[in-house]
Amino acid sequence: MSQVETTTDEVTRSTTDDGDHERFAHVVVPASAVTEAYITGTPVTALCGKTWVPTRDPGRYQVCPTCQEILDAARAMGSDE
């Protein structure tokens, strides 16, 4: 079984019509994409489809329920191998 590398990061600007995305830390795979985005200022896309440029501490926010659900499903599929 291969392990999925993940990270969470807080949203700074919403590109969706749903304002709730602003209130969550989102999951980005691979985690290295967030590090690169911090350095280069390029946007990343979360599992839920949210796209933004990370700039804030994700530890201050609850994890996006949609991202968490997708991540849990992917992990469950990985453990079936």
Image: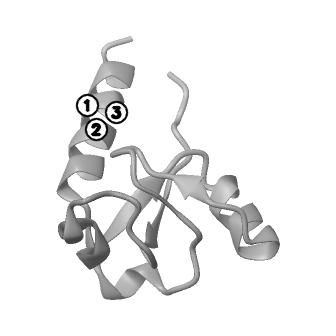
> Marks 1/2: CA distance?
5 Å
Q: Nearer the viewer, mark 1 or mark 2?
A: 2
Q: Secondary structure at mark 3?
A: helix
Whether tag 1 and tag 2 are in contact, CB under 8 A, the answer is yes
Return the residue found at the far right. Answer: 40
Report the mark closest to the observer, 2 or 3: 2
Identify the residue at horizontal 42%, vertical 75% (top origin).
10
Does dot 1 land on a helix, a strand or a loop? helix
Three-letter amino acid code at the position of disc 3? Arg
Q: Is disc 1 in contact with disc 3, using a CB cutoff of under 8 Å?
A: yes
Which residue does the image show at 38% across and 68% down from the upper left?
14
Q: Is residue 80 above or below residue 23?
A: above
- Residue position for label 3: 75
Left or right? Give the position of 3 relative to 24. Answer: right
* x then y, percent, for residue 60: 34, 88
- The earlier-in-sequence mark between 2 and 3 is 2
Q: Position of residue 13 (x, y in %)?
A: 44, 75
Residue 1, placed above or below residue 62: above
What residue does disc 1 label? 73
Q: Amino acid at mark 2?
A: Ile
Q: Is residue 71 above or below residue 44?
A: above
x and y percent of residue 78 in the render? Answer: 39, 22
Nearer to the camera, 31 or 24: 24
Q: Which mark is residue 70?
A: 2
Could you classify mark 1 by the number of other residues whose Cα lies within 10 Å: few (under 14), some (14-19), or many (20 or more)? few
Residue located at (24% from left, 77% from top): 23
- Asked whether, in this view, residue 16 is left or right of residue 39, the answer is left
Q: How would you rate the neighbour count of disc 3 (Cα within 10 Å): few for under 14, some for 14-19, many for 20 or more?
A: some
- For label 2, count other residues whose C-alpha is less than 10 Å away and answer few (under 14), some (14-19) or many (20+): some
The amino acid beneath tag 1 is Ala
Q: Secondary structure at mark 2?
A: helix
